[in-house]
């Protein structure tokens, strides 16, 4: 019996809101968190998220979501693929990576 991919979903614990990433492991998955102890920043940790098949799809939607693209799609290498970066509507710097 194989593992099935758990759907992404939102969850609140006390004052903290979580957006949990889809995962095959029901106990360990990535998440985004928002709460009174977290301060959005472009100067903090930089995370790179899987950009799917083509990060241009994501980067093309950033402006409509009140964000700003700060690094357009750029080839790292044939092996690593492409990266891009944006500032989200709350001021966080986020990277995306894809093979195309």
Image (cartoon, rainbow, N blue to C red):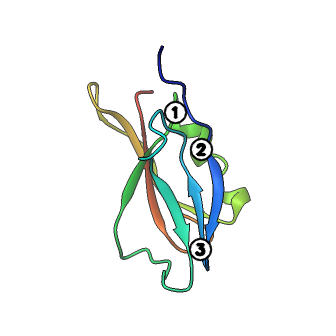
* Residue extending furthest toward the bottom: 36
Residue 45 picture quarter: bottom left
Q: Please tell me which residue is depicted at 26% across the width and 25% down the height of the picture.
A: 79
Which mark sits nearer the N-terminus, 1 or 3? 1
Decide: marks 2, 1 in contact (CB < 8 A)?
yes
Q: Is residue 36 above or below residue 72?
A: below
Number of marks in the rendered image: 3
Q: Secondary structure at mark 3?
A: loop
* Residue extending furthest toward the top: 1
Which mark sits nearer the N-terminus, 2 or 3? 2
Residue 44 picture quarter: bottom left
How busy is the neighbourhood of tag 2: few (under 14 within 10 Å), some, or many (20 plus)?
A: few
Q: Secondary structure at mark 2?
A: helix
Residue 81 in the image, given as x and y percentages of width and height: 35, 31
Q: Is residue 73 above or below residue 41?
A: above
How busy is the neighbourhood of tag 1: few (under 14 within 10 Å), some, or many (20 plus)?
A: some
Residue 18 in the image, given as x and y percentages of width and height: 58, 63
Mark linked to residue 90: 3
Q: Secondary structure at mark 1?
A: loop
Q: Please tell me which residue is depicted at 57% across the width and 35% down the height of the picture.
A: 6
Residue 7 in the image, given as x and y percentages of width and height: 62, 38
Q: Which residue is mark 1?
A: 52
Q: Is residue 90 above or below residue 80?
A: below
Residue 23 in the image, given as x and y percentages of width and height: 49, 38
Real-space Cα distance between discs 2 and 1? 9 Å
* Residue extending furthest toward the front: 1
Looking at the image, residue 61 sits to the left or right of residue 44; the answer is right
Q: Which residue is mark 2?
A: 58
Numbered disc in front, either 2 or 3: 3
């Amino acid at each position: 019996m194989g593992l099935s991919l758990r759907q992404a979903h939102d969850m609140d614990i006390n004052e903290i809101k979580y957006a949990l990433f889809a995962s095959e492991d029901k106990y360990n998955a990535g998440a985004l968190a928002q709460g009174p102890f977290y301060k959005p920043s472009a100067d903090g940790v930089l995370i790179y998220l899987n950009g799917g098949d083509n990060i241009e799809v994501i980067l093309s939607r950033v402006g409509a979501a009140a964000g700003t693209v700060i690094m357009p799609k750029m080839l790292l290498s044939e092996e690593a693929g492409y990266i891009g970066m944006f500032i989200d509507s709350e001021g966080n710097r986020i990277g995306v990576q894809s093979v195309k």
